[in-house]
Amino acid sequence: MSRLNRLLKHINIFDKRNRNHLLYYISYYLRLENPINKPFVIDIETTNMCNARCIMCPRSNMKRPIKFLEWRTFKKIIDEAYPYTEKVLLHMFGEPLLHKDLIKMIKYCKTKGIPEVLISTNGMFLTEKISRKIINSGLDTLIICLDGNTKETHEKIRPNTNYDVIVKNIEKYVKILGQKKKPKTILQFIEMKENKHEVDDFIYRWSKFDNLIINIKICETWAGTVKGHELVKIENEKFPCPKLWYSISIFSDGSIGICCRDYDKFVVVGDAKKERIYDVWHSKKMKTLRKFHIEKQFEKISLCKDCIEWYWEKHPHIVEIRKNVIKST
């Protein structure tokens, strides 16, 4: 209960989002099938189209059709969820910069007072024009992915991308960003067997940019669907995944899922076009899924039975093993 105790010391009970966060801790630790809180993290897949074919991503096995989330569906989601939402991530299994309404979406989230809006990009379309729009959009966090310190390594890991183009885009972006405080910009290197030998050189090269946060992140298995690249060994004991008590994921066709690692809609609990998010949150389907987790019957959920990423929830410090790397001089 240490997290709850820390929260109680700093919480403003008159703030709706803070109060909801407290209710989450109560709901999770009491293992309530029908939580008394609302979801406060929303993953929104603006599109499932992507130019890259990354070797550690299950997207190459995706069977669902390519979609771009409709503006009216996006607006409905935000209008329903914003009072309790703390964080919106505008990416899942696609390249968000390919959506024509992305900047409009970011701005709409900010007009609704959502504290953190985040996108992750492979950097191929981070042109000077797009960079300026992103910097002026109100976006809180931008993650740029670069998985090598050499052209050969990066393009082996991320086929259909061009290392030289991405590096040039990043250098232009940081120049435009200058000393602006937003968006917080994270240059992310996913460490795996194929590139671990380049980590130190990568940090040395990019640490000269004071407006970049270098983040060396471990490689995940996407709920056990992609294996062979990860470096971290996982303990065996599982526990109910907290995501079922604090977040929802919305696919590019408006379907509502339970996890951002569900690349092919293995578990769908509702439709954001037709249903209210909070009705789905308290639905029989969601209660049943939480019950399976409470009873540790993970095998009854196709998405969860082979997942090992639950450990991120228990050990968040493992996920970003070199976050905020000390800048070299």
Image (cartoon, rainbow, N blue to C red):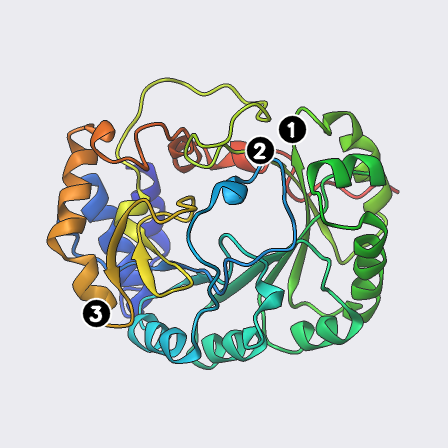
- The foreground one among 171 and 16 is 171
Q: CA distance from mark 1 to mark 2?
A: 6 Å
Residue 200 location (% of width, % of height): 80, 31
* Amino acid under disc 3: Glu
**Count of residue discs:** 3
Q: Please say if the residues under marks 1 and 2 sit with CB atoms less than 8 Å apart.
A: yes
* Amino acid under disc 2: Cys
Instruction: Give left or right: position of 138 versus 4.
Output: right
| Residue ID at (80%, 62%) | 174
Label 3, secondary structure: give it: loop
Residue underneath mark 3: 275
Q: Quadrant of the C terminus?
A: top right
Residue underneath mark 1: 192
| Residue ID at (79%, 39%) | 203
| Residue ID at (19%, 42%) | 289
Q: CA distance from mark 3 to mark 1?
A: 40 Å
Mark 3 or mark 1, whichever is nearer to me: 3
Residue 200 lies, with reference to residue 29, above or below; the image says above
| Residue ID at (56%, 70%) | 99
Residue 219 image label: 2
